[in-house]
């Protein structure tokens, strides 16, 4: 009889061992995190990752997280290294390193990358502030001739540095405007041909 | 050393102003810093880039011309050899007898004839290789947009 059923001390022992086993399996989550955060925050701030990713869109987020982890989560240290021209390549994360890439990055990345190119690279008219200088040639083909001939008398080199800067600026503007005029001309020809 | 580089850059600036190559305008952004230039490159004729103006930024090292400048297009340019973020001028082919003018001319010819062997923009390279009409359409659309049309 005693061999078939468990006596009280045995029962207590089983319960105790079971309890400890369950605790052992369930608890690693919290104490382990504490253990790994001993080198100043194993948790990388997702906002930092996002910030760097926006400054350097060419970088892999995984590499950013890795770099942040290695320098103790210092946004400044990572940024400085990147700005000084050193890439993160030399510190490539091991393939086993698969951090939980912040969920927020997916939506923000898609929203921030689509308008970004246009914001980073406005068209040349906006860039050189030429909207006022765009002649509207459609009805007056003579107007464009006048502007192009007046610019024809472009001076070359000047001994005065301000004049030089002015000349360069004018050459740039004229190059853009001329290209635009040419393109418009082509459009008009295509239209009249059609 | 710096003064050697400055002198040389100033000479090149002067030369490029007095005798500019066809389709190229280049000079320092400001004469306070001769080591940062802005260049405009015209898209070569007979290519989808024709009619386009492509701005780029050139940064010169302090020991120019011993070391080459780096160049980066500051516009959207869809090209197999353009990394959207950085284009480094092939430094292995650099020699001090080269010049800004030669760099810009070689960039221009790169626009005309992409080097398919070392694509920096893999997507653009694939499109260029496999779907040429789409590639040309995209380039032309970018050209027009850059001119504000």
Image: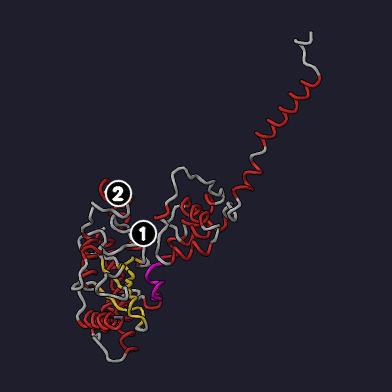
First in residue order: circle 1 vs circle 2: 1
Please tell me in which quadrant of the rendered image residue A168 appears: bottom left
Are the residues flagged by discs 1 and 2 from a single subunit?
Answer: yes
Q: Does residue B34 lie above or below B85 as drawn? A: below
The residue that disc 2 covers is B127
Which chain letter goes with mark 2?
B
Task: Report the residue at 40% width, 78% height from top.
Answer: A132
Label 2: few (<14), some or many (≥20) within 10 Å? some
Which SS type dominates the magenta stretch? loop
**Whole-percent x, y for residue B120 in the image:** 31, 55
**Whole-percent x, y for residue A138 in the image:** 32, 71
Judge depth for marks 1 and 2 and give the one in front: 1
* Residues drawn in magenta: A121-130
Q: Toward the viewer: B78 or A2? A: A2
Task: Report the residue at 19% width, 80% height from top.
Answer: B19
The residue that disc 1 covers is B84
Task: Report the residue at 75% width, 24% height from top.
Answer: A13
Work out whether residue A139 can be spotted: no
Asked if the magenta segment contains residue A125, the reply would be yes
Please tell me in which quadrant of the rendered image residue A21 appears: top right
- In three-dimensional space, the C-alpha distance between marks 1 and 2, rounded to whole angstroms, equals 15 Å
Q: Toward the viewer: B139 or A162? A: A162
Asked if the magenta segment contains residue A189, the reply would be no
């Amino acid at each position: 009889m005693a061999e078939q059923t468990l006596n009280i001390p045995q029962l207590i022992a089983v319960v105790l061992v079971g309890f400890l086993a369950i605790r052992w399996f369930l608890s690693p989550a919290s104490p382990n995190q504490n253990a790994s955060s001993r080198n100043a925050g194993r948790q990388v701030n997702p906002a930092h990752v996002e910030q760097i990713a926006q400054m350097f869109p060419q970088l892999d987020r995984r590499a950013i997280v890795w770099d942040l982890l290695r320098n103790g989560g210092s946004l400044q240290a990572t940024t400085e290294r990147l700005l000084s021209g050193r890439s993160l390549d030399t510190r490539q994360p091991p393939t086993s390193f698969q951090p939980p890439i912040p969920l927020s990055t997916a939506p923000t990345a898609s929203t921030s990358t689509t308008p970004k190119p246009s914001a980073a690279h406005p068209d040349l008219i906006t860039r050189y502030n030429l909207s006022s200088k765009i002649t509207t040639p459609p009805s007056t083909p003579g107007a464009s001739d006048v502007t192009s001939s007046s610019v024809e008398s472009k001076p070359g080199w000047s001994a005065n540095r301000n004049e030089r800067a002015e000349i360069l600026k004018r050459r740039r503007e004229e190059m853009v405007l001329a290209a635009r005029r040419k393109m418009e001309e082509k459009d008009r020809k295509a239209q009249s041909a059609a | 050393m710096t003064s050697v580089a400055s002198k040389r850059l100033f000479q090149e600036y002067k030369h490029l102003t007095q005798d500019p190559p066809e389709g190229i305008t280049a000079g320092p952004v400001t004469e306070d810093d001769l080591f940062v230039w802005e260049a405009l490159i015209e898209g070569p004729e007979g290519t989808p880039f024709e009619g386009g103006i492509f701005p780029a930024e050139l940064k010169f090292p302090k020991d120019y011309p011993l070391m080459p400048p780096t160049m980066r297009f500051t516009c959207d340019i869809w090209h197999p050899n353009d990394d959207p973020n950085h284009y480094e001028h092939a430094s292995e082919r650099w020699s001090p007898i080269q010049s800004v003018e030669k760099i810009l001319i070689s960039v221009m010819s790169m626009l005309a004839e992409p080097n398919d062997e070392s694509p920096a923009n893999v997507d653009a390279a694939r499109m260029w290789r496999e779907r040429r009409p789409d590639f040309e359409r995209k380039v032309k659309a970018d050209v027009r947009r850059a001119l504000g049309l």
